[in-house]
Structure formats: C-alpha cells, structure tokens
Amino acid sequence: MSDAAASARVDSWLWAVRVYKTRSAATTACRAGHVRVDGDRAKASQQIRAGDEVRVRIQGFDRHLVVRQLLTKRVGAPVAATAYDDRTPPPPPREERAFVPVRDRGAGRPTKRERRDIDRLRGR
C-alpha cells in the first residue's frame, strides 16, 4: 500500500464523513484552530491515518472522533458513520445548563422595560 493511500488530508476527511457541509468550511475551521489531531492544532493539509484522534469544536461543543477508515470523497451518511468511532461525551442534562434568555429573531429592539428586566437578570 502506498503512503498516499495510507493517509488523507484532515479537511478532506472531515468533509467526506459529513462533519462539515463543505470542504472550505472544514478548511476554515482548521485555520481558526477548531480542529486538533492527537491533541495538536491541525492545519488543513495535515495528513491523518487510521487510529488518529480528531477533536472538532462545533457550535461550542467538542466532538471526539477516532479515524477508522480514510475517505477522500463524500459518501452517504450510513457509510460515513462507519468511518469513525464517535467518543464524544454525552451533553450535560438540561437542569445543569445555565439559563440564557433569548429574544426571538426579528422581535426588534428591546423596550426600556425589557432592557431593565434583562439588566436585572444579569445582576446589574
């Protein structure tokens, strides 16, 4: 087996196993430092091999993936799920998460009364 077949680019692999929708999104995540391979920050062109641990930060949460199979072309979801072991810890229960008040999108600017309520919630 040649060395090229034994490794794949990390951004290409993340796109192929459907972690990111586009390869450019995977490349951007690598540049931003959201992708780590075996604990070290990964450049988009870094080569990965079977058995490597890839940590990806998506929407504030880390996903821990162990490479099982190298893919360079995007495949269907059932095949992509067999290409890695997902060792991501389960999210904390809702009771343990901090409550963050969220305004509905498009609701406009808060009124003076709503601003006072928001400040009271934040402890100001």
Image (cartoon, rainbow, N blue to C red):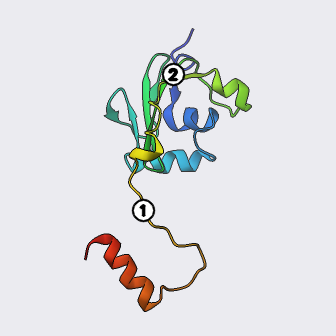
Image depth: mark 2 or mark 1 in front: 1
Image-quadrant location for residue 68: top right
* Label 2: element kind: strand
Residue, far bottom = 112
Between the C-alphas of marks 2 and 1, the distance is 35 Å
Q: Residue at x 74, y 31 (%)?
A: 76
**For the residue marked with disc 1, what is the amino acid?**
Val
Mark number for residue 67?
A: 2
The percent position of residue 59, horizontal first and vertical second, equals 48, 50
> Mark 1 — residue?
100
Whether residue 44 sits left or right of residue 25 in the image: it is left
Q: Return the residue nearer the eye: 9 or 90.
A: 90
Whether residue 36 sits left or right of residue 15 in the image: it is left
**For the residue marked with disc 2, what is the amino acid?**
Val
Residue, far left = 124
- Image position of 75 with respect to 94: above or below: above
